[in-house]
Amino acid sequence: MKRLALTAFLVASLAAAAHAGVDRPPQFVAIAFDNCTELERWQELSDFAAEMNRDADRVHFTFFVSGINFIPDAERMSYRGPRQRPGASMINFGGTADAVRARIEYANELHRRGHEIASHAVGHFNGATWSAADWAAEFDPYNDVLRRIAFPVANVVGFRAPYLATSPGLYPVLKERGFRYDASRTAEAGEWPKQIDGVWRFNLVGLRLRGSGKSVLSMDYNFFVAHSRAVNDPQRQASYRDQMLETYLEYLKTNYSGNRAPLHIGHHFANYQGGAYRQALISFARTVCRLPEVRCVTYSKLADFMDGLDAATLEAYRKGDFPHAGPPSLNIARTALRQ
């Protein structure tokens, strides 16, 4: 009986593979950072990526940089955001000229190493009520600021709105200015990206907090709010760290063994929960970006992949019409959480 059952299982598996519409896609993981102010975080992420990529390309990040980070405090009056007075910003300017210079050097070096510098606008204002003219007025000074960097402004092809606050006026401006994708919206965890009016929508997703009934967006600040109402809680930071890691791993396992929809994870350079969320993310990347079918890529590389798909293949991916894999075996040493 056991032999018959095994034979039936193998026949069924081969039949399923034979009728699958397309080959199984890689499991893409896009890890991005917003604002990108703190110099120590630039250094930490640069060092981590260099370590991971020492003998193979394993992880590349997307940095949604606020233009304000490249404007020294002494030059703040050179910027005027839409409907704002000169020199106004919702976040700090870039600090000293030396601090700005160091930030630019990190951006140039990481870009040279295959990471992506993308736009997070300039003054971190809420653009939910902005017109197309307002958005254009915000993108103009961003381009001016980016002329300080070594690579062409045309290489900046992605955008995430501060506060994820968009308006109908945003998307015509993105298209007109040659942006390939927007990462400002939200979706379900198993959704493949859609291209609307020539712009890919790479959306953050709703996740179930592991071990609880709560839902949370796949971004560190949203964990911060869900866990402690955005107040540091030192006594519970270790448990928050572990819960984030377990939530991200469940996200990976579900998509990996399901329809392989890309993972979208957004973090900030800010030290939420005393760095607990940063530790969880690094441990997650250290674990999953080494898996043979996982590709931890920039959003522009994900856009390259999406551009290469025909409609039938993308529809097959959405339906999961390909030979599936079981969930990966993930062994994480607890010491890795503290690295």
Image (tube, rainbow, N blue to C red):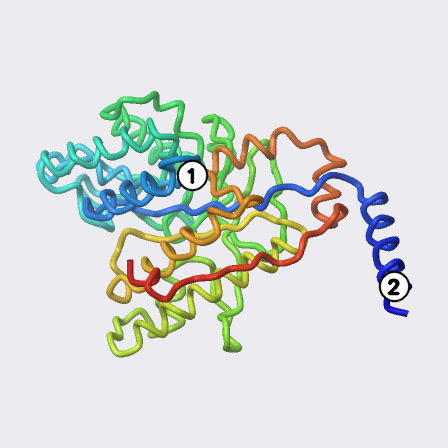
Packing grade of label 2 (10 A; few <14, some 14-19, many >=20) is few
User: Which residue sits at x=52%, y=49%?
Assistant: 203
Badge 2 amino acid:
Arg
User: Which residue sits at x=25%, y=71%?
Assistant: 232
Badge 1 amino acid:
Phe
Packing grade of label 1 (10 A; few <14, some 14-19, many >=20) is many
Query: Is residue 316 shown above or below 176?
Result: below
User: Which residue sits at x=69%, y=43%?
Assistant: 24
Question: In the rendered view of the protein, which quadrant contains the N terminus?
Answer: bottom right
Specify the quadrant of the image occupied by residue 68.
Answer: top left
Residue 242, image x, y percentages? 39, 69
Q: Which mark is residue 36?
A: none
Q: Mark 1 points at which residue?
A: 159
Closer to the camera, 304 or 69?
304
Residue 23, image x, y percentages? 72, 39
User: Which residue sits at x=62%, y=58%?
Assistant: 327
Query: Is residue 156 shown above or below 35?
Result: above
Q: Mark 2 points at which residue?
A: 3
Closer to the camera, 246 or 216?
246
